[in-house]
C-alpha cells in the first residue's frame, strides 16, 4: 500500500476532529462504525479508439465516526480504503491486449445524514476526496480529487446499543490524475461515478 499523502492525512484528521468536537459540543454522544463493503467504478478513466483504462472493483474497509445533532439529523466523517488495480487495454489492428497494474483507492468524506423518526431509511449528502495510490499511479501528478457524495441507506436495530447499517453511496467528481509527458495527456478530465455498497455496525460511545 502506498503511503497516504500528508495533505490527505490532514483532511481526514480534520474531518474526524470536527465530528468528535461536535459530539462534545452537543452532548448527544458519538458513534463509531467499523465498515466493510464493495467498490464499483461506473465510469472508465479513458476511452479512445486505441485505448481503454478503468479501475477494477474491489473490497473496501474503513470506519465512520458520527454525531447525532437532533432526532432527524446527524453528521459523520468516513474513511474507506480499497485495493483497486488499474486495467489498461490497447487495441492494435483490431487485436486487444491488456495489462493490470497494482493500485489502491481511498475515499474520505464528511456528510449530513437525514433519517425520519418513524423510518429505517436515511439519506446522506456531503463532500470529500478520492485519492489514488500504488504502482499504477506512481508517475501521476496530483492523485487527489474533490468529490460530491450522495447516498441512501437502511438502519435496523440489532441490540440495545448497536444496529445494522447498509449504505449505498456514490462519489461524483470530474478531476483525474495527470501523467506528465504523455501525449495525448493521460488522463483528460472525465466525469467519474464511483459507487459503493457498505455494511457497518454502529457502536454507541455515549448517550444518543
Image: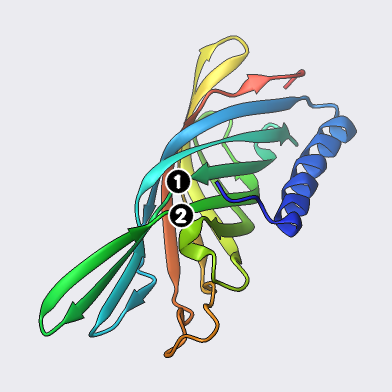
The residue drawn where x is 68% and y is 40% is: 76
Do the residues bearing badges 2 and 1 touch, measured as CB atoms within 8 Å? yes
Decide: is 151 above or below 33. below
Q: Name the element at disc 2.
A: loop
Mark 2 to mark 1 CA distance (whole Å): 6 Å
Quarter of image, res 42: bottom left
Mark 1 — residue?
A: 83
Q: Could you tell me residue 155's position as x and y percent?
A: 50, 28
Q: Is residue 169 visible?
A: yes
Check residue 103 in the rendering and tell me which mark sits there, or answer none. Answer: 2
Quarter that holds the C terminus: top right
Residue with the most extreme bottom position: 183
Residue at screen point 54% across, 23% down = 201
- 68 relative position to 203: left or right: right
Front one among 181 and 85: 181
Query: Residue 75 in the image: x percent, y percent?
Result: 70, 42
Q: Residues within 10 Å of mark 2 (few under 14, many from 20)?
A: many
Numbered badge on residue 2: none
Residue in the picture at 60% in, 34% down: 63
Amino acid at each position: 500500500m502506498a503511503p497516504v499523502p500528508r495533505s490527505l492525512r490532514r483532511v481526514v484528521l480534520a474531518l474526524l476532529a470536527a465530528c468528535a468536537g461536535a459530539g462534545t459540543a452537543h452532548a448527544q454522544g458519538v458513534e463509531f462504525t467499523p465498515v466493510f463493503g464493495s467498490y464499483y467504478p461506473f465510469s472508465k478513466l479513458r476511452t479512445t479508439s486505441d485505448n481503454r483504462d478503468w479501475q477494477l472493483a474491489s473490497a473496501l474497509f474503513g470506519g465512520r465516526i458520527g454525531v447525532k445533532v437532533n432526532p432527524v439529523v446527524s453528521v459523520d466523517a468516513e474513511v474507506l480504503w480499497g485495493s483497486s488495480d488499474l486495467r489498461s487495454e490497447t487495441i492494435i489492428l483490431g487485436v486487444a491486449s491488456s495489462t493490470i497494474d497494482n493500485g489502491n483507492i481511498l475515499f474520505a468524506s464528511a456528510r449530513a445524514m437525514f433519517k425520519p423518526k418513524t423510518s429505517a431509511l436515511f439519506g446522506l449528502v456531503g463532500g470529500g476526496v478520492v485519492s489514488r495510490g500504488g504502482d499504477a499511479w506512481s508517475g501521476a501528478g496530483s492523485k487527489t480529487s474533490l468529490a460530491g457524495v450522495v447516498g441512501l441507506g437502511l438502519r435496523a436495530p440489532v441490540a440495545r446499543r448497536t444496529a445494522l447499517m447498509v449504505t449505498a453511496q456514490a462519489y461524483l467528481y470530474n478531476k483525474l490524475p495527470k501523467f506528465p509527458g504523455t501525449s495525448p495527456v493521460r488522463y483528460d478530465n472525465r466525469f467519474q461515478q464511483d459507487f459503493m455498497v457498505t455494511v457497518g455496525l454502529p457502536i454507541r460511545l455515549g448517550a444518543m
